[in-house]
């Protein structure tokens, strides 16, 4: 995907975060498992935070958002979603399909933020995208663990 400006990239990321908030809120509303519903609502709140970060990012000079208090740490990747084909959201999807869709969404968001991190011209911008990478990687890992647990319950 080609972008004409850094702001176009940010606008695209904002759009994707808005979609993620809607997706997790809708998925939570359709989920019967209380633990999973709570996780989806927590993800929606975190995606709202990502949206806030991006909406308040001004990197025309030095980025204005400070990220000093954030604790960076490595998030492992089970790579489950890497082996799956993306699917489209539909009401009434099975739990398995919701997890696959969510994993692929997080994988795509992680890929986008890694690319934005590489293209960033300031240390602050790089740190913001590093934060977003870490958050999306954490979501992906949580979903992959849920998927593994669910499939184990089915005997797979």
Image (cartoon, rainbow, N blue to C red):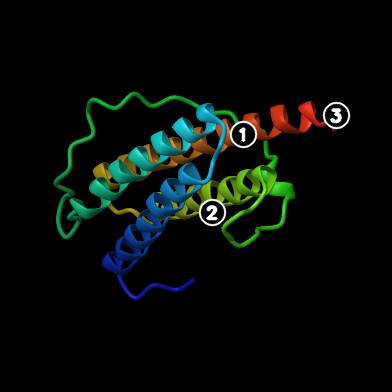
Horizontal and vertical percent for residue 116? 40, 54
Horizontal and vertical percent for residue 39? 47, 32
Horizontal and vertical percent for residue 41? 41, 37
How packed is label 1: few (under 14 Cα within 10 Å), some, or many (20 or more)? Answer: some
Q: Residue furthest right?
A: 155
Label 2: element kind: helix
Q: CA distance from mark 1 to mark 2?
A: 14 Å
Residue 18, image quadrant: bottom left
Disc 3 + disc 1, Cβ < 8 Å: no
User: Upstream in the sequence, badge 3 or badge 1?
Assistant: 1
Q: Is residue 54 left or right of residue 119?
A: left
For discs 2 and 3, the disc positioned in front in the rendered view: 3
- Residue assigned mark 2: 108
Disc 1 + disc 2, Cβ < 8 Å: no
User: Upstream in the sequence, badge 2 or badge 3?
Assistant: 2
Q: Is residue 122 left or right of residue 133?
A: left
Q: Is residue 122 visible?
A: no
- Residue assigned mark 3: 155
Question: Residue sitting at 41 percent across and 47 percent down?
Answer: 25
Q: CA distance from mark 2 to mark 3?
A: 29 Å
Horizontal and vertical percent for residue 62? 16, 50
Q: Nearer the viewer, residue 129 or 139?
A: 139
Q: Up-down: is 28 above or below 4?
A: above
- Which of the numbered marks, if any, corresponds to residue 77? 1
How packed is label 2: few (under 14 Cα within 10 Å), some, or many (20 or more)? Answer: some
Question: Residue sitting at 23 percent across and 25 percent down?
Answer: 69
Disc 2 + disc 3, Cβ < 8 Å: no
Question: Residue sitting at 57 percent across and 58 percent down?
Answer: 91
Q: Is residue 24 visible?
A: yes
For discs 3 and 1, the disc positioned in front in the rendered view: 3
């Amino acid at each position: 995907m080609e972008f004409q400006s850094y702001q176009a990239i940010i606008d695209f990321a904002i759009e994707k975060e808005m979609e993620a908030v809607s997706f997790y809120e809708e998925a939570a509303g359709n989920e019967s498992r209380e633990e999973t519903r709570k996780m989806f609502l927590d993800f929606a709140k975190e995606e709202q935070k990502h949206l806030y970060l991006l909406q308040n990012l001004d990197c025309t000079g030095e980025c204005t958002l400070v990220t000093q208090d954030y604790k960076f740490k490595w998030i492992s990747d089970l790579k489950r979603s890497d082996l799956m084909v993306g699917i489209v959201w539909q009401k009434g999807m099975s739990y398995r399909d919701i997890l696959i869709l969510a994993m692929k969404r997080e994988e795509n968001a992680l890929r986008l933020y890694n690319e934005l991190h590489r293209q960033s011209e300031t240390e602050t911008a790089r740190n913001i995208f590093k934060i977003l990478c870490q958050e999306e990687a954490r979501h992906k890992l949580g979903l992959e663990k849920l998927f593994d647990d669910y499939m184990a319950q089915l005997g797979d």
